[in-house]
Amino acid sequence: MVNAMSIKRHANRGFSLVELMIAMGIGVMLFSGILTIFTSSRQSFDLTNEISAVQENARFALERLANDIRMAGFQGCATSTDSAAAVQASNAPTTNPAQTAVRGAEVTSAGWLPSQPAELAGISPEPRVGSDVLMLQLAEPVTERLATAMLTPSDNLELESNSIGLAAGDLAVVADCQSADLFRVTAVSGTTIEHGAGSNFSGNLQKAYSPGATTATDPTRVMKYSYRVYYVADTGRTNTSGDPVYSLYVYDMEDIDNDDPAEELIEGVEFLQLQFGAETGLNVTSYFSADGANYDPDEITLVRLGMLMHTIEESADEEDTRTYSVLDEDIGPQGSSGTGHGNDKRARMVFTSSVKIRNRRL
Protein backbone atom coordinates (compact mmCIF):
# COMPACT_ATOMS: atom_id res chain seq x y z
CA MET A 1 0.00 0.00 0.00
CA VAL A 2 1.40 3.43 -1.04
CA ASN A 3 2.44 5.57 1.86
CA ALA A 4 0.19 8.66 1.97
CA MET A 5 2.91 10.84 3.51
CA SER A 6 5.29 9.92 0.67
CA ILE A 7 2.72 10.99 -1.91
CA LYS A 8 2.17 14.29 -0.09
CA ARG A 9 5.88 15.02 0.09
CA HIS A 10 6.23 14.30 -3.64
CA ALA A 11 3.28 16.56 -4.47
CA ASN A 12 4.73 19.47 -2.47
CA ARG A 13 8.21 19.23 -3.96
CA GLY A 14 9.31 22.61 -5.64
CA PHE A 15 11.39 23.26 -8.77
CA SER A 16 14.99 22.24 -8.75
CA LEU A 17 17.75 24.86 -9.21
CA VAL A 18 18.32 23.69 -12.79
CA GLU A 19 14.63 24.02 -13.60
CA LEU A 20 14.55 27.54 -12.11
CA MET A 21 17.59 28.60 -14.13
CA ILE A 22 16.05 27.25 -17.33
CA ALA A 23 12.76 29.02 -16.61
CA MET A 24 14.58 32.29 -15.83
CA GLY A 25 16.60 32.00 -19.04
CA ILE A 26 13.47 31.48 -21.08
CA GLY A 27 11.83 34.43 -19.31
CA VAL A 28 14.81 36.68 -19.98
CA MET A 29 14.79 35.75 -23.67
CA LEU A 30 11.07 36.39 -23.92
CA PHE A 31 11.40 39.73 -22.11
CA SER A 32 14.36 40.75 -24.30
CA GLY A 33 12.35 39.93 -27.40
CA ILE A 34 9.37 41.90 -26.17
CA LEU A 35 11.62 44.83 -25.21
CA THR A 36 13.30 44.77 -28.64
CA ILE A 37 9.93 44.75 -30.39
CA PHE A 38 8.67 47.58 -28.15
CA THR A 39 11.82 49.67 -28.70
CA SER A 40 11.68 49.13 -32.46
CA SER A 41 7.98 49.98 -32.55
CA ARG A 42 8.57 53.10 -30.46
CA GLN A 43 11.39 54.24 -32.77
CA SER A 44 9.21 53.62 -35.82
CA PHE A 45 6.33 55.50 -34.17
CA ASP A 46 8.59 58.46 -33.28
CA LEU A 47 10.11 58.54 -36.77
CA THR A 48 6.67 58.40 -38.40
CA ASN A 49 5.47 61.29 -36.23
CA GLU A 50 8.60 63.34 -36.95
CA ILE A 51 8.34 62.76 -40.71
CA SER A 52 4.63 63.62 -40.66
CA ALA A 53 5.48 66.88 -38.91
CA VAL A 54 8.18 67.63 -41.50
CA GLN A 55 5.74 66.99 -44.36
CA GLU A 56 3.08 69.20 -42.78
CA ASN A 57 5.60 71.99 -42.14
CA ALA A 58 6.90 71.75 -45.71
CA ARG A 59 3.36 71.94 -47.09
CA PHE A 60 2.63 75.07 -45.07
CA ALA A 61 5.94 76.73 -45.98
CA LEU A 62 5.56 76.06 -49.72
CA GLU A 63 1.96 77.30 -49.73
CA ARG A 64 2.93 80.48 -47.87
CA LEU A 65 5.79 81.19 -50.27
CA ALA A 66 3.73 80.28 -53.33
CA ASN A 67 0.90 82.65 -52.38
CA ASP A 68 3.24 85.63 -52.19
CA ILE A 69 5.26 84.64 -55.27
CA ARG A 70 2.09 84.44 -57.38
CA MET A 71 1.21 87.98 -56.32
CA ALA A 72 4.68 89.47 -56.79
CA GLY A 73 4.45 92.78 -58.61
CA PHE A 74 0.67 92.99 -58.17
CA GLN A 75 -0.62 96.57 -58.41
CA GLY A 76 -4.28 96.17 -59.16
CA CYS A 77 -5.67 96.30 -62.67
CA ALA A 78 -2.52 97.86 -64.15
CA THR A 79 0.04 95.11 -64.78
CA SER A 80 3.57 95.86 -63.58
CA THR A 81 5.12 94.75 -66.88
CA ASP A 82 3.06 97.21 -68.94
CA SER A 83 2.89 100.12 -66.51
CA ALA A 84 5.05 99.94 -63.39
CA ALA A 85 3.77 102.08 -60.56
CA ALA A 86 5.25 105.58 -60.44
CA VAL A 87 7.12 105.93 -57.14
CA GLN A 88 5.97 109.06 -55.32
CA ALA A 89 7.18 108.09 -51.81
CA SER A 90 10.50 109.75 -51.05
CA ASN A 91 11.83 106.87 -48.91
CA ALA A 92 10.31 103.86 -50.64
CA PRO A 93 12.28 100.58 -50.74
CA THR A 94 12.21 100.71 -54.54
CA THR A 95 12.60 103.13 -57.42
CA ASN A 96 11.08 100.67 -59.89
CA PRO A 97 8.50 98.18 -58.56
CA ALA A 98 8.76 96.07 -61.69
CA GLN A 99 12.45 95.43 -61.06
CA THR A 100 12.10 94.71 -57.34
CA ALA A 101 8.91 92.65 -57.47
CA VAL A 102 10.81 89.39 -57.13
CA ARG A 103 14.51 89.10 -56.32
CA GLY A 104 16.85 86.57 -54.83
CA ALA A 105 20.30 86.38 -53.30
CA GLU A 106 22.69 83.66 -52.21
CA VAL A 107 24.22 84.08 -48.76
CA THR A 108 27.94 83.29 -48.67
CA SER A 109 30.59 83.71 -46.00
CA ALA A 110 31.75 86.81 -47.89
CA GLY A 111 28.25 88.37 -48.11
CA TRP A 112 25.19 88.32 -50.33
CA LEU A 113 25.28 87.66 -54.08
CA PRO A 114 23.90 89.94 -55.53
CA SER A 115 24.75 92.46 -52.83
CA GLN A 116 22.53 92.89 -49.78
CA PRO A 117 20.00 95.76 -50.17
CA ALA A 118 20.77 98.64 -47.80
CA GLU A 119 17.37 98.43 -46.08
CA LEU A 120 18.11 94.81 -45.06
CA ALA A 121 21.44 95.58 -43.37
CA GLY A 122 19.90 95.08 -39.92
CA ILE A 123 18.09 91.82 -40.66
CA SER A 124 17.88 89.66 -37.54
CA PRO A 125 18.46 86.80 -37.07
CA GLU A 126 21.03 86.68 -39.86
CA PRO A 127 20.33 84.42 -42.86
CA ARG A 128 22.20 81.13 -42.91
CA VAL A 129 25.34 80.88 -45.04
CA GLY A 130 24.79 78.51 -47.98
CA SER A 131 21.07 79.22 -48.16
CA ASP A 132 19.17 81.65 -50.41
CA VAL A 133 17.04 84.73 -49.66
CA LEU A 134 13.78 85.53 -51.46
CA MET A 135 12.63 89.18 -51.63
CA LEU A 136 9.12 90.02 -52.80
CA GLN A 137 7.27 93.32 -53.25
CA LEU A 138 3.57 93.54 -54.02
CA ALA A 139 0.36 95.40 -53.43
CA GLU A 140 -1.95 93.38 -51.20
CA PRO A 141 -4.84 91.67 -53.04
CA VAL A 142 -7.40 93.00 -50.53
CA THR A 143 -8.30 96.38 -52.00
CA GLU A 144 -10.54 99.38 -51.35
CA ARG A 145 -12.51 101.33 -53.96
CA LEU A 146 -12.16 105.03 -54.61
CA ALA A 147 -15.45 106.72 -53.72
CA THR A 148 -15.18 110.11 -55.44
CA ALA A 149 -13.08 111.53 -58.24
CA MET A 150 -9.97 113.61 -57.55
CA LEU A 151 -10.06 117.04 -59.15
CA THR A 152 -6.27 117.53 -59.13
CA PRO A 153 -3.31 115.13 -58.63
CA SER A 154 -2.72 116.62 -55.15
CA ASP A 155 -6.24 115.95 -53.86
CA ASN A 156 -6.79 113.46 -51.05
CA LEU A 157 -8.09 110.01 -51.83
CA GLU A 158 -11.67 109.50 -50.69
CA LEU A 159 -12.38 105.79 -50.18
CA GLU A 160 -15.69 103.96 -49.87
CA SER A 161 -14.35 102.59 -46.57
CA ASN A 162 -11.00 101.89 -44.92
CA SER A 163 -11.52 98.18 -44.34
CA ILE A 164 -7.89 97.53 -45.32
CA GLY A 165 -6.70 99.52 -42.31
CA LEU A 166 -4.50 102.15 -43.96
CA ALA A 167 -2.66 104.27 -41.40
CA ALA A 168 -0.21 107.15 -41.46
CA GLY A 169 3.22 105.91 -42.48
CA ASP A 170 1.97 103.02 -44.61
CA LEU A 171 3.05 102.59 -48.19
CA ALA A 172 0.08 102.25 -50.53
CA VAL A 173 -0.76 101.92 -54.21
CA VAL A 174 -3.58 103.61 -56.08
CA ALA A 175 -4.24 102.17 -59.53
CA ASP A 176 -6.70 101.90 -62.36
CA CYS A 177 -6.14 99.88 -65.54
CA GLN A 178 -3.87 102.50 -67.11
CA SER A 179 -1.75 103.93 -64.29
CA ALA A 180 -0.52 103.24 -60.77
CA ASP A 181 1.18 105.32 -58.06
CA LEU A 182 3.16 104.13 -55.04
CA PHE A 183 2.88 106.70 -52.25
CA ARG A 184 3.32 107.13 -48.49
CA VAL A 185 0.19 107.77 -46.44
CA THR A 186 0.77 110.96 -44.45
CA ALA A 187 -2.55 111.11 -42.57
CA VAL A 188 -5.86 109.27 -42.31
CA SER A 189 -9.18 110.76 -41.26
CA GLY A 190 -11.99 108.24 -41.52
CA THR A 191 -12.02 107.27 -45.20
CA THR A 192 -9.86 110.22 -46.30
CA ILE A 193 -6.28 109.29 -47.21
CA GLU A 194 -3.66 112.03 -47.49
CA HIS A 195 -0.40 111.82 -49.47
CA GLY A 196 1.30 115.10 -48.69
CA ALA A 197 4.79 116.33 -49.44
CA GLY A 198 7.68 115.45 -47.16
CA SER A 199 7.08 111.71 -47.07
CA ASN A 200 6.35 112.02 -50.80
CA PHE A 201 8.39 113.94 -53.35
CA SER A 202 5.73 116.53 -54.15
CA GLY A 203 2.42 115.36 -52.72
CA ASN A 204 1.12 114.93 -56.27
CA LEU A 205 0.14 111.69 -57.97
CA GLN A 206 0.75 111.34 -61.68
CA LYS A 207 -2.89 112.08 -62.40
CA ALA A 208 -6.27 112.73 -60.81
CA TYR A 209 -7.90 109.34 -60.36
CA SER A 210 -11.65 108.74 -60.67
CA PRO A 211 -13.70 105.77 -59.42
CA GLY A 212 -14.39 104.45 -62.93
CA ALA A 213 -17.48 104.34 -65.10
CA THR A 214 -19.14 101.79 -62.78
CA THR A 215 -18.07 99.98 -59.63
CA ALA A 216 -17.50 96.83 -61.68
CA THR A 217 -15.87 98.35 -64.77
CA ASP A 218 -12.38 99.80 -64.74
CA PRO A 219 -12.52 100.67 -61.01
CA THR A 220 -9.76 102.55 -59.23
CA ARG A 221 -8.38 100.60 -56.29
CA VAL A 222 -6.25 101.50 -53.28
CA MET A 223 -4.07 98.81 -51.66
CA LYS A 224 -1.40 98.43 -49.00
CA TYR A 225 2.10 97.86 -50.35
CA SER A 226 4.16 95.03 -48.84
CA TYR A 227 7.81 94.03 -48.89
CA ARG A 228 8.58 90.54 -47.55
CA VAL A 229 11.87 88.71 -47.23
CA TYR A 230 11.95 84.93 -46.73
CA TYR A 231 15.08 83.13 -45.55
CA VAL A 232 16.50 80.39 -43.28
CA ALA A 233 18.26 81.12 -40.00
CA ASP A 234 19.42 79.42 -36.82
CA THR A 235 16.72 79.73 -34.15
CA GLY A 236 19.25 79.59 -31.32
CA ARG A 237 17.38 76.57 -29.95
CA THR A 238 18.63 72.98 -29.82
CA ASN A 239 16.93 69.60 -29.62
CA THR A 240 17.42 67.12 -26.77
CA SER A 241 20.68 65.93 -28.41
CA GLY A 242 22.09 69.45 -28.66
CA ASP A 243 21.63 69.78 -32.44
CA PRO A 244 20.76 73.30 -33.71
CA VAL A 245 17.22 73.88 -34.97
CA TYR A 246 16.77 75.93 -38.17
CA SER A 247 13.61 77.67 -39.32
CA LEU A 248 12.09 79.64 -42.17
CA TYR A 249 11.72 83.33 -41.28
CA VAL A 250 9.86 86.26 -42.84
CA TYR A 251 11.07 89.85 -42.47
CA ASP A 252 8.39 92.29 -43.62
CA MET A 253 8.18 96.02 -44.14
CA GLU A 254 6.88 96.74 -40.64
CA ASP A 255 9.84 94.86 -39.14
CA ILE A 256 12.22 96.74 -41.45
CA ASP A 257 10.76 100.16 -40.60
CA ASN A 258 10.81 99.51 -36.84
CA ASP A 259 14.13 97.62 -36.63
CA ASP A 260 12.26 94.60 -35.27
CA PRO A 261 13.47 91.01 -35.65
CA ALA A 262 12.03 88.74 -38.32
CA GLU A 263 9.11 86.42 -37.57
CA GLU A 264 9.75 82.68 -37.33
CA LEU A 265 7.30 80.85 -39.58
CA ILE A 266 8.17 77.15 -39.65
CA GLU A 267 10.86 75.18 -37.82
CA GLY A 268 12.84 72.38 -39.41
CA VAL A 269 13.77 74.21 -42.65
CA GLU A 270 17.53 73.69 -42.96
CA PHE A 271 18.20 75.22 -46.40
CA LEU A 272 16.22 77.25 -48.95
CA GLN A 273 17.34 77.18 -52.57
CA LEU A 274 15.91 79.22 -55.44
CA GLN A 275 15.94 79.22 -59.22
CA PHE A 276 14.37 81.94 -61.36
CA GLY A 277 12.77 81.21 -64.70
CA ALA A 278 12.53 83.53 -67.68
CA GLU A 279 10.29 82.69 -70.64
CA THR A 280 12.00 83.13 -73.99
CA GLY A 281 9.04 82.29 -76.22
CA LEU A 282 7.61 79.07 -77.66
CA ASN A 283 7.01 77.82 -74.08
CA VAL A 284 10.76 77.65 -73.43
CA THR A 285 11.87 78.67 -69.95
CA SER A 286 15.50 79.15 -68.93
CA TYR A 287 16.46 78.98 -65.25
CA PHE A 288 19.07 81.00 -63.41
CA SER A 289 20.37 81.31 -59.88
CA ALA A 290 20.26 84.75 -58.26
CA ASP A 291 24.03 85.14 -58.57
CA GLY A 292 24.13 83.95 -62.20
CA ALA A 293 25.39 86.16 -65.02
CA ASN A 294 22.07 85.94 -66.92
CA TYR A 295 19.87 86.68 -63.92
CA ASP A 296 17.55 89.63 -64.68
CA PRO A 297 14.77 90.46 -62.16
CA ASP A 298 12.76 92.19 -64.91
CA GLU A 299 12.41 88.95 -66.89
CA ILE A 300 11.45 86.54 -64.10
CA THR A 301 8.14 84.77 -64.73
CA LEU A 302 8.56 81.69 -62.56
CA VAL A 303 10.28 80.77 -59.29
CA ARG A 304 11.46 77.30 -58.35
CA LEU A 305 11.60 76.57 -54.63
CA GLY A 306 13.71 73.87 -53.01
CA MET A 307 13.84 73.18 -49.28
CA LEU A 308 15.92 70.71 -47.27
CA MET A 309 13.92 69.90 -44.14
CA HIS A 310 15.06 68.09 -41.00
CA THR A 311 13.21 66.41 -38.15
CA ILE A 312 13.63 68.19 -34.83
CA GLU A 313 14.77 65.16 -32.83
CA GLU A 314 17.20 62.43 -33.83
CA SER A 315 15.12 59.54 -35.15
CA ALA A 316 17.54 57.51 -37.28
CA ASP A 317 19.89 54.72 -36.16
CA GLU A 318 22.98 56.13 -37.87
CA GLU A 319 24.51 59.52 -38.57
CA ASP A 320 23.24 61.11 -41.79
CA THR A 321 26.06 61.10 -44.35
CA ARG A 322 23.89 61.53 -47.44
CA THR A 323 24.26 64.29 -50.02
CA TYR A 324 20.94 65.89 -51.00
CA SER A 325 20.26 67.52 -54.36
CA VAL A 326 18.18 70.65 -53.82
CA LEU A 327 17.53 72.17 -57.27
CA ASP A 328 21.03 72.92 -58.58
CA GLU A 329 22.80 72.59 -55.22
CA ASP A 330 24.28 69.46 -53.62
CA ILE A 331 24.16 69.66 -49.84
CA GLY A 332 26.31 67.14 -48.00
CA PRO A 333 27.37 66.70 -44.37
CA GLN A 334 28.74 69.78 -42.67
CA GLY A 335 32.48 70.17 -43.13
CA SER A 336 35.12 72.36 -41.55
CA SER A 337 33.77 75.39 -43.46
CA GLY A 338 30.53 75.16 -41.49
CA THR A 339 28.33 74.73 -44.57
CA GLY A 340 26.26 71.63 -45.25
CA HIS A 341 23.68 69.79 -43.21
CA GLY A 342 24.25 68.73 -39.62
CA ASN A 343 26.35 65.74 -38.59
CA ASP A 344 23.53 64.09 -36.67
CA LYS A 345 20.94 61.32 -36.75
CA ARG A 346 17.98 63.45 -37.82
CA ALA A 347 15.91 62.39 -40.82
CA ARG A 348 15.90 64.76 -43.80
CA MET A 349 13.67 65.27 -46.82
CA VAL A 350 13.78 67.50 -49.92
CA PHE A 351 10.70 69.38 -51.12
CA THR A 352 10.38 71.36 -54.35
CA SER A 353 7.75 73.46 -56.07
CA SER A 354 7.48 75.70 -59.14
CA VAL A 355 5.35 78.84 -58.94
CA LYS A 356 4.19 81.08 -61.79
CA ILE A 357 4.05 84.82 -61.19
CA ARG A 358 0.56 85.84 -62.27
CA ASN A 359 1.54 89.38 -63.25
CA ARG A 360 4.40 88.15 -65.44
CA ARG A 361 2.73 85.49 -67.58
CA LEU A 362 3.32 85.89 -71.31
Image (cartoon, rainbow, N blue to C red):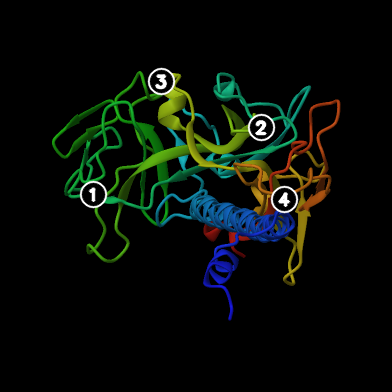
Pointer 2 local density, CA inside 10 Å: few below 14, some 14–19, many at least 20: some
Label 4 secondary element: strand
Q: Which residue is mark 2?
A: 243
Q: Is residue 55 above or below residue 150?
A: below
Query: What residue lies at 86% left-to-right and 26% top-to-bottom?
Result: 336
Pointer 1 local density, CA inside 10 Å: few below 14, some 14–19, many at least 20: many
Q: Which residue is mark 3?
A: 258
The N terminus is located in which quarter?
bottom right
Q: On the picture, is 225 further left or further right than 243?
A: left
Query: What residue lies at 83% left-to-right and 42% top-to-bottom?
Result: 332
Q: Earlier in the sequence, mark 1 or mark 4?
A: 1
Q: Nearer the viewer, mark 2 or mark 4?
A: 2
Tell which of 321 and 332 is nearer to you: 321
Query: What residue lies at 45% left-to-right and 19% top-to-bottom?
Result: 259
Q: Earlier in the sequence, mark 3 or mark 2?
A: 2
Q: Which residue is mark 1?
A: 146
Where's residue 165, x and y in %? 24, 39
Q: Amino acid at mark 4?
A: Gln
Where's residue 288, x and y in %? 77, 49
Q: CA distance from mark 3 to mark 2?
A: 32 Å
Q: CA distance from mark 1 to mark 4?
A: 38 Å
Tell which of 185 and 229 is nearer to you: 229
Q: Earlier in the sequence, mark 4 or mark 3?
A: 3
Q: Which residue is mark 4?
A: 275
